[in-house]
Amino acid sequence: MTTLTYLQGYPESLLEQVETLIAQNRLGEVISKRYPDTHGITTDKALYQYTQDFKNQYLRNAPPINKVAYDNKIHVLKNALGLHTAVSRVQGGKLKAKAEIRVATVFRQAPEAFLRMIVVHELAHLKEKDHNKAFYQLCCHMEPHYHQLEFDMRLWLICKDEGWL
Ligand SMILES: [Zn+2]
């Protein structure tokens, strides 16, 4: 079950359900029925605006974001979902923090719910560096179904990887 390495850390009972769906050749069908829509946020400019709208609504006090972009160098399946960097640079004698968010290109053509999940994840990193309890509380504050979406997004990635979508 090499495909399930993307699901490490999830409860055994949940993994068994996934294995059953895979054995029945139904995982792709289940995921595409549950998430039939894609989104229109295909440019970096649109992605920036989309992210900024979330930030304005939920994380007004977090540091400003300077750049949001799709990045084809992120290999989602290996480890990272997206990337967030905080670059400090001196500008006019003052130290300025610059936050950048990069989203793996695979999410350019994804259900909107999964893009939302990634953006929420990366925005939460503006306030919490680690994947700790406070971090996931922030994620759930911005998207109440965060945990479900992260799990389903992993199933979706498995399906893409295996050519089931
Ligand atoms: Zn993270």
Image (cartoon, helix red, strand yellow):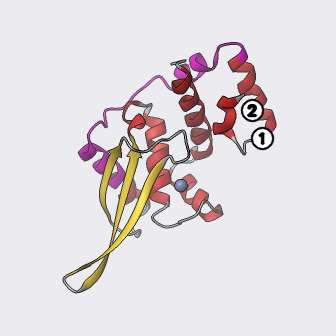
- Mark 1–mark 2 Cα distance, whole angstroms, equals 7 Å
Looking at the image, do the residues carrying marks 1 and 2 touch, with CB atoms under 8 Å apart? Answer: yes
* Residue corresponding to mark 2: 15
- Is residue 34 at least partly visible in the picture? no
Q: Helix, strand, or loop for circle 2?
A: helix
- Please, what is the dominant secondary structure of the magenta stretch? helix
Q: Residue furthest bottom?
A: 93
Other-residue count near label 2 (Cα within 10 Å), few / some / many at <14 / 14–19 / ≥20: some
Residue drawn at (68%, 30%) of the image:
2
Depth check, front residue: 141 or 148? 148
| 20 with respect to 154 (left or right) | right
Residue drawn at x 56%, y 22% is 162
Q: Amino acid at mark 1?
A: Pro
> Closer to the camera, 104 or 2?
2
Q: Is residue 47 left or right of residue 129?
A: left
Q: Amino acid at mark 2?
A: Leu
Please give the range of residues in magenta.
23-52
Q: Position of residue 20 (x, y in %)?
A: 75, 20
Give the x, y percent position of residue 78. Answer: 55, 42
Q: Is residue 62 magenta?
A: no
Q: Is residue 133 above or below residue 11?
A: below
- 54 relative to 73, above or below: below
Q: Is mark 2 within 8 Å of ligand 1?
A: no
Residue linked to disc 1: 11
Q: Residue at x 36, y 32 (%)?
A: 39
Where is residue 65 drawn, in percent x and y? Answer: 33, 62
Image quadrant where one finds the N terminus: top right
* Secondary structure category for the residue under label 1: loop
- Closest to the observer, 165 or 31: 165
